[in-house]
Amino acid sequence: MRRRTLARQFLGWQLGIVALLLAAVGALAVVQSDAAFRETQGRRMLSVAEDVAAGTLLRERLLAGDFGPVPAIAVSARNLSGADDVVVVDGAGVVRAAGDPARIGEPFDDGGSTAAAGRSWVGYPGGRTVDAQVPVMAPDGAGTGVIGVVAARVAAPPLLTGLAAASGQVTALLGVALVIGVVGSLLLARRVRRQTLGLEPAEIVELVQRREAMLLGVKEGVLGLDPAHRVTLLNDAARDLLDLPGEQPGDVDVAALDGRLRDVLTGAVTGPDQLVLRGSRVLVLNRRPVVVDGTDVGAVVTLRDRTELTALQDRLDASRHVTDTLRAQAHEFTNRLHTIAGLTELGEHDEVRRFVAGIVAESDGWRREVTGRVGDAAAAALLVAKASLATERGVSLTLAPTARLDPVDPARDPALSADLVTVLGNLVDNALDAVGRTGRVEVDLASEACAVRLRVRDSGPGVASGIADEVFRHGFTTKAAEQPGGRGLGLALARQVCLRRGGTIAVHNDGGAVFTAVLPLAGEGVA
């Protein structure tokens, strides 16, 4: 069956409301009319009964016991007043005049009246009749007391008769209400259709259901914000990626999120594929403003988990570093072999021996220095490999005079070696990129009571004080924007490792940039 349109539904509801209002108004009119009838007719019947009871002839006849003229007095009063009945009762409570002749001589039922006691009374027997009773007092000089009662009665017309009499007004009122209801419902339906973009209620429900199904079905996180940056939409994937368990959209406070994520969500940072670190995840965010009829109604942010891709990129970077190191060593060895070959052809055998001895002493010297002062085998191997890369770039890579790292039992902290390599490798790479050619990089490692402290100093231009925190928080540098394939996340990943272990990482300038990282041992904290 074809669904009724929104205009027809509004019309039906409007007409139903009009009918209910008319019924309520009719009932109220009946009640008010009945109350007005009782009040008006009660006063009128009381006045009729008082006029009859005050008549001299009636009082004389009742006092003398001559009741012959009494019916004529009652009939005359009934005809003149328009009452339905006028009853005259003598002092003994016997009816002496009534509209029904059969009642004459019968006892009178006063219905609880106080007229026999000398007080006027108005009652409503049956709810639809007005009965007024007035005592007849003895004439002056003829004694005192009540010598009779005069009762005047009138019945209210039936309810249907009253409504039929007002049928013309009711019809006119119904017609006016019908016109107003139709016009009002059409105007209201038109306004609602404009506000709902012409969609019927069933279409709106279907649209909402489809949207919910779509949001729950997509793997990417979707987050909606209004112009005031309040979250109005949050699917399950976005809740998981942002680590907001059990939160409803309205409960998420964007201002309470960490700086980089807050800046991207609010639009303070623009651009496609913004990288954000959230806990142990690397997220890619894309924010798109939503504009309707030229008005900004908010924004939609999509989130993708790039953690696995970043981990794979780190592995590829490690392989690239190994390749670069091997290439640098091969290049260096090739030059040395060419030198040895030339000296041999020249017959300078003593010079060949001295040249080879110098190379061996130089290589073994750095290796012995590193392995003798760095107790962690992975960190020592990393520094040995980085030395060849630094030599190819013309950079001097040295250990600080105070550098000494004691070995840590892997059973006590099995993740320390991997974390140490991640932080140290990223800091050394960052320093090598910063100094360029003919620069210096110094590495200092120290074992403390409950932590390992790293310090990497370079002779580069340093870090501007205004972005000292940004280089960690944002997770990218200007090199990442300028160099395709740049790391971009190195310092952010180093910071993430330090914070995960409860440590710290900071940078200051002292003849170049000085990065200091503290990695607490497992189960320890940093004051």
Image (cartoon, grey):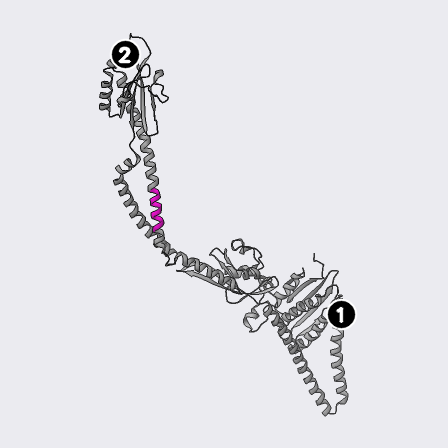
Secondary structure at badge 2 equals loop
Q: Quadrant of the C terminus?
A: bottom right
Q: Amino acid at mark 2?
A: Gly
The tag on residue 65 is 2
State the residue lying farthest toward the top: 141
Residue range highlighted in magenta: 11-21
> For mark 1, what is the residue?
373
Residue at 67% x, 63% y is: 517
Residue 240: quadrant of the picture: bottom right
Is residue 176 one of those drawn in magenta? no
Q: Quadrant of the N terminus?
A: bottom left
13 is within the stretch colored magenta: yes
Left or right? Give the position of 312 relative to 89: right
Query: Residue at 23% across / 21% down in the picture?
Result: 75
How many marks can you see? 2
Direction from residue 174 to residue 335 in the image, left or right: right
